[in-house]
């Protein structure tokens, strides 16, 4: 799998685990977890950043040559998100943006209307937009048509740890997408991440599943292994599902068998 | 996790992936897969073995210092299984035996009555019995009481690739067992193996999921990573499941949340 | 449950099963199925209607005093849907409209942007809009804010028979909604309909699950019973889920236990 | 469905809901629930019975012409169960017996060895044995071979309300059985009962799902409707499962699609 490279917006990555930084109890714990995860791309909320500050998360990322993916967490309207993205571009000298426009601070679910509006504006403005979205195949298609560099459907609500609630929708998104699909939000444990990759996602993004685990660095290693495992399993071509072993001549395959 | 050692019948293993050899298209493919899996213990059907033969699977195991776990595949009665186990002990100079007593060659499901009968006989005869069983917590308990060194509940029928059909039963077995629990049979892909470990199984045994995959060595690597991922995730202490993120003060945990 | 009345847009219904008419092999079969279902509200595609025609589905509905719910099936834009709704209002003398705006004729999934646009226009124009939507809690909320009389989330794609793929989302919609929630699309068999009601939906809408079953009238009776069963079970207050019976003092409840 | 009769041990029933009596807060509540359920066969623990007592549950059953099915609840060995069955036969003048031999009073799971032993003894002694068993297809086959009149696999542990944890196993049992299959234990709500029937079970047995619901009589009515719904849905021939509606020409059927 040495040549199995992920390309997002022209950048190449050998790791398919994108990390977030929210929820870490300390910068030391975060650093340890990021290193253990093997991530090459980590998202940071611009609102929590002070790029001029010493000892910030940005220093940690620079130290380990991890690319920074600024995000618009905390934005509730297209206008706020566009403004935040522009500030991020200026401050961090990157046109990559993880676009989050949530409907409320209760569910943290994306607002489809504001999200699409912001995506169109930012794509037209030259950003490479990675859009955090719900798991609706039609909205994913519209975001792609709006010029997004990647679509990032949720498995379940942010921070819920409920895993992938609707594998059928994720499969429909993967089947139709011509840009990378990154499973973002809801991952609770390693098997969730492996499943995301087996469904054909190009990468997985997670934060609190690692930062709020009892042992963050160990969970980060688990997620690194799980993403690799799921990716390899997809490429290796799994055996079909069968009623039982003797049914060898008529496997029950079908894409619905989850 | 360097000191996270699995002990079965006094033997120590750092790998928690037990491999089978059935279904491999060639000895070369099997060897490549075994190496990629990192396994330290591999089960072989005595009925298919000719220990004196050159170029056999036993040679491959010796070459890579993989311990051999003879099994009684193809036995339908306690009597056949006991006889086969004794032949295996003599031929292979090991008291380890993976005890399989299946009800028919159609479902390949274990026969609980013959299985328990054989387990009692073999344990009394000094064998270290690893018993392939259904996922009934009571039968698992009885096998342990009969002196088995490990219980090996199925996730789903052999060769079905249906994964773990009843995580609740596996959890009940794990909770009660004082001997190692090895998930045996039914694994189809990497996330299945990770889930087995997250449920608390001590190891995973699989064969056709690897040997009949399109690319066996790559799937073997996937399973190695998945077992590691699931084990690490268990030890790392996953985040609780929540209704959504804002429900921070009242997590919906509970052991039933799969 | 004699006083357990469903109210949608000021109309009262004692049946909570809304029927569709698509897919029936003949008008006779359809009539038999509608009668067996006990439905009091049935949706009809305006595009397939010729109200002046003798022996049409409208005659069947009139004969059995079943209210007609015209729908905008076959519309791909807000403009088409609004026009179709207005034609329906004129032709059928009702301000009820089941609003469908689908993204393509391949998936038949709703287009969230066009749907919301049409809902706003029609609600402002005095229609009682029942909006067929995906299962996104945020879009459901926006449709309610736009003035819809009911939201109708899908369980899975139209005609798929896949049941309710994401009970968590349906529960979130039900919890937040102040208008009736009608599970629409994806029902395949009776237990799917019962589950919808147990999740708190106010009604279920289905068509091909009945019209394309081998015995439509018998399946219609099954759906009638299933909707009643699920509704009664919700009102009856089910027992909590427990690890096993002996765990009487600490039930594992929690809304996530599906 | 007027001629859809269930036959167990030569008795005919038009209701496919077998009730239990455990857990009822009072005899009045129990009577109301039994009537609402429409049951024609109800199981009673011999250990809790005093047939000579006025105002007992037996009086209620006689009053409503409900057949009594004595059970051996509370027995932990074959010997106890056989003795209890013989006492029941004498006291109640019936050769019907619901055979329960549980492994402990903690899990209430059946003990496969003692159960099979008792079943063989009782069948040879002329009893019509309805055997409460785990969901192992092989044990079910052995019980049938031992002469049982019906096999009664659990959906999940008694009183757990967890529904059917392993539909695959229930389907395998149904496919192979030549005697009636009654889903016994684990039912929590109406959709669970409907699913049992859709999987092909001939009847459903439940107790605490009704007796411990907040409104027992209403839940009993729900279960009656759910069993009817599931039975009708099975006979009506459900639509196949499809990826989405446009995939009309290649339905994803297959028996595994639950």
Image (spheres, coloured by chain):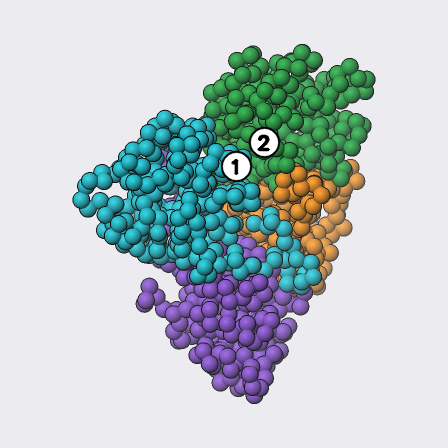
Chain colours: A purple, B cyan, C orange, D green
Identify the residue at image location x=57%, y=63%. Answer: A213
Residue A63 in the image: x percent, y percent? 46, 81
Mark 1 neighbour class, 10 Å CA radius: few under 14, some 14 to 19, many 20 or more: some
For residue C144, the mark is: none
Whether pointer 1 and pointer 2 mark residues with C-beta atoms closer than 8 Å, the reply is yes
* Subunit bearing disc 1: B
Residue placed most toward the observer, A114 or B108: B108
Q: Residues within 10 Å of mark 2 (few under 14, many from 20)?
A: many
Residue D189: quadrant of the picture: top right
Q: Is residue D230 visible?
A: no
Residue D116: give x, y in percent of width and height: 52, 23
Q: Is residue B160 left or right of residue B93?
A: right
Q: Is residue B18 visible?
A: yes
Q: Residue D73's x, y, as percent?
A: 65, 26
Which residue sits at x=22%, y=38%?
Answer: B50
Left or right of residue A16: residue C234: right
Q: Residue at x 75, y 18 (%)?
A: D50
Which residue, as the protein is rendered here, is positioned at the far left? B54
> What residue is shown with label 2?
D103
């Amino acid at each position: 799998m040495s040549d199995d490279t992920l390309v997002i917006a022209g950048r190449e990555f050998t790791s398919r685990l994108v990390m977030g930084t929210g929820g870490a109890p300390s910068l030391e714990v975060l650093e340890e977890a990021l290193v253990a995860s093997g991530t090459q791309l980590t998202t940071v909320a611009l609102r929590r950043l002070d790029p001029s500050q010493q000892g910030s998360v940005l220093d940690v990322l620079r130290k380990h040559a991890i690319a920074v993916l600024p995000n618009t967490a905390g934005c509730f309207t297209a206008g706020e998100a566009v403004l935040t993205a522009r500030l991020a571009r200026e401050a961090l000298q990157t046109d990559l943006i993880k676009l989050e426009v949530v409907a409320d601070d209760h569910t943290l679910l994306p607002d489809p209307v504001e999200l699409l509006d912001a995506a169109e504006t930012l794509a037209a403005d030259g950003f490479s937009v990675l859009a955090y979205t719900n798991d609706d195949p039609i909205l994913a298609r519209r975001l792609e048509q709006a010029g997004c560099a990647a679509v990032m459907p949720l498995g379940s609500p942010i921070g819920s740890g409920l895993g992938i609630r609707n594998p059928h929708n994720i499969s429909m998104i993967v089947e139709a997408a011509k840009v990378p699909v990154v499973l973002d939000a809801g991952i609770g444990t390693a098997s969730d991440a492996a499943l995301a990759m087996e469904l054909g996602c190009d990468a997985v993004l997670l934060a609190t599943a690692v930062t709020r685990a009892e042992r963050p660095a160990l969970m980060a290693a688990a997620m690194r292994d799980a993403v690799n495992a799921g990716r390899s399993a997809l490429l290796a071509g799994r055996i079909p599902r069968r009623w039982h072993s003797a049914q060898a001549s008529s496997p029950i395959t079908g894409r619905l068998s989850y």
